[in-house]
Amino acid sequence: MLMNTRIVVSIAGFGGLGKTTLAKAVYDEIKGQFDCTAFVSVSRNPDATKLLKDILYELHKGGEHPGANLDEIKHLIDLVRDFLRNKRYLIVIDDIWDKEPWDKAIGLALMENNKRSRIITTTRIIGVAEHVGGCYRLKPLSDESSEILLYGRIFGSKDKCPRQFSEVSKNILKKCGGVPLAIVTTSSLLANKSEDIRVWNDVCSSIGSGLGRNPGMDDMRKILLLSYYDLPSHLIVVYCT
């Protein structure tokens, strides 16, 4: 009987580690093995009614569903359960910020049906992941993987990195702290400036004290702002309007 039970995996880690990217990659890889699938994102302050309707909408592949005009949470939960009752399902619930949406809506709707169904959640909050179950703590990239990502995006490989960029690139990687989003954003910023070491030094100085030591959003925001300020003026105007 254990082989047929529902399995929940909760991917946890701070912003920029690639939780959603990992969940989406797994979802795309295995969704063909299931009778029905859904990938639903949760806002920071979710509305349980909308969340359940989003699940129904995804399960019906964007078509009409019986819960479209309903506002009663219990009725919507019953509709999801009825739809999933005899189906092997794969559902991703992305970016849960609190236990309440799981306890009052998601967890009640995604029933155990002994069909070897799978649920994947992502969250920045370790306590939420542990509460939902199957907590998997996503770690920053290793030094080697960070180098492969940075040098690969800018030069094609580490071997093609000019020697004069070696020291500053190491400092940039140290400040990125193995956070994929930080490395990708920084490498995109430097990709067209691979011959101007002054720009590299300026970027390195602007990143902050280091995401590895303090995995908050302030340093990540500095990296993203660097890319924002590097946009052509007409795109900045579009972005701000």
Image (tube, rainbow, N blue to C red):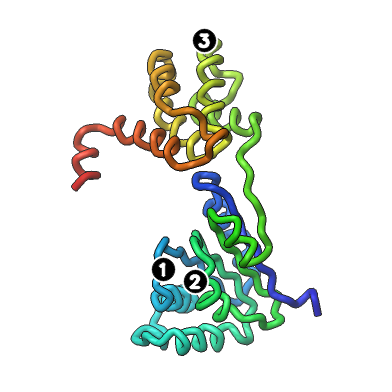
Q: Which mark is residue 101?
A: 2
Residue 31's quadrant in the figure? Answer: bottom right
The kind of residue on which mark 3 rests is: Gln
Q: Which mark is residue 46?
A: 1
Q: Which mark is residue 164?
A: 3
Disc with the residue nearer the chain's start (1 vs 2): 1
Task: State left or right for residue 34 relative to residue 69.
Answer: right
Percent from the top left, x then y, of residue 189?
Answer: 40, 29
SS for dot 3: helix
In this picture, is 124 found above or below 42? above
Image mark count: 3
SS for dot 2: helix
Instruction: Tell which of 54 and 31 is nearer to you.
Output: 54
Disc with the residue nearer the chain's start (3 vs 2): 2
Contact between marks 1 and 2 (CB within 8 A): the answer is yes
**Residue at x 55% of width, y 52% of height:** 19
Contact between marks 3 and 2 (CB within 8 A): the answer is no
In this picture, is 113 found above or below 231? below
Q: Nearer the viewer, mark 3 or mark 1?
A: 1
Instruction: Tell which of 127 and 137 is nearer to you.
Output: 127
**Residue at x 68% of width, y 63% of height:** 134
* Quadrant in which the N terminus appears: bottom right
The kind of residue on which mark 2 rests is: Pro
Residue 236's quadrant in the figure? Answer: top left
**Residue at x 50% of width, y 47% of height:** 15
Percent from the top left, x then y, of residue 94?
Answer: 51, 61
